Amino acid sequence: MKITREMTVGEVFESYPTHAQKLANKLQEMGLSCVGCGASTHETLEAAMYLHGMDDIAIEGLLESLNGIISEQIDGSTILLTKRAAEKFLAICEGEGKKGSKLRFLDKLGGCSGYEYVLDFTHDVKDTDVIFPSNGVDIVVDKGSLSRLVGCEIDYLDGLNASGFKISNPNAKSSCSCGNSQSY
């Protein structure tokens, strides 16, 4: 099935729950920041785009991007760091004098949806950790968080409205509109 302009925002998320966070990120990037609003779930993508002053060319571009996202295969056995995120992490390590650090990735209770992500530097690997090498960076995850985090993709966005590491988690059942916390 393909995402079409006639689909409601709610149908898009219901049809592709494992890609929901990436889809929401793309919609927000295109100026549809209301994706977290319950009222918008009944609007078609076309109506939402028109209401935000966008034309048919923008709608077609969005549909192409959204359909590209749903065609991506999710590897539920690993945790990935995009090339852009790996480069940013390594640059931060260099700038903060932490060259050779690994990326510790965990979630903890907190935020408005239940759990929030934590990214940190580490040199320590414990017996309770699993390491996922990705684009030249070792991602360290405690086995206790593994079932909630496996399948995640960590990206880095750099834009006028949002800059920082962005995590797409196919295990999340819901997340807050700001994208900083999620529930499972």
Image (cartoon, rainbow, N blue to C red):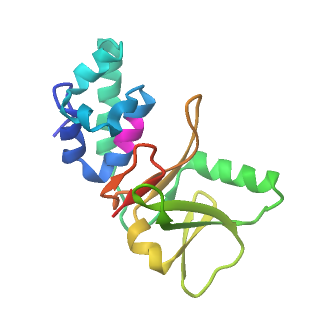
Q: Quadrant of residue 77?
A: bottom left
Span shown in magenta: 22-26
Q: Position of residue 136 (x, y in %)?
A: 63, 60
What is the chief secondary structure element of the magenta stretch? helix
Q: Quadrant of residue 119?
A: bottom right
Q: Residue furthest bottom?
A: 127
Query: On screen, 166 above or below 42?
Result: below
Q: Residue at x 58, y 31 (%)?
A: 159
Expressed as whole percent of the image width and height from the top left, the position of residue 101 reads 72, 66
162 part of magenta stretch: no
Along the horizontal axis of the image, is 162 left or right of 88? left
Instruction: Name the quarter where the N terminus is drawn.
Output: top left
Within the image, what quadrant is residue 38 found in? top left
Residue 29 place in picture, x, y as percent = 45, 31
Residue 24: in magenta span:
yes
Look at 19% across and 36% down and name the residue there. Answer: 2
- The number of callouts visible is 0
Seen in the picture, residue 69 relative to 79 is either above or below; the reply is above
In this image, 155 relative to 71: left or right?
right
Instruction: Tell me what residue is drawn at x 33 percent, y 64 percent.
Output: 184
Taking the view exactly as shown, the residue that stands out farthest to the right is 97
Which residue does the image show at 50% across and 68% down from the upper left? 108
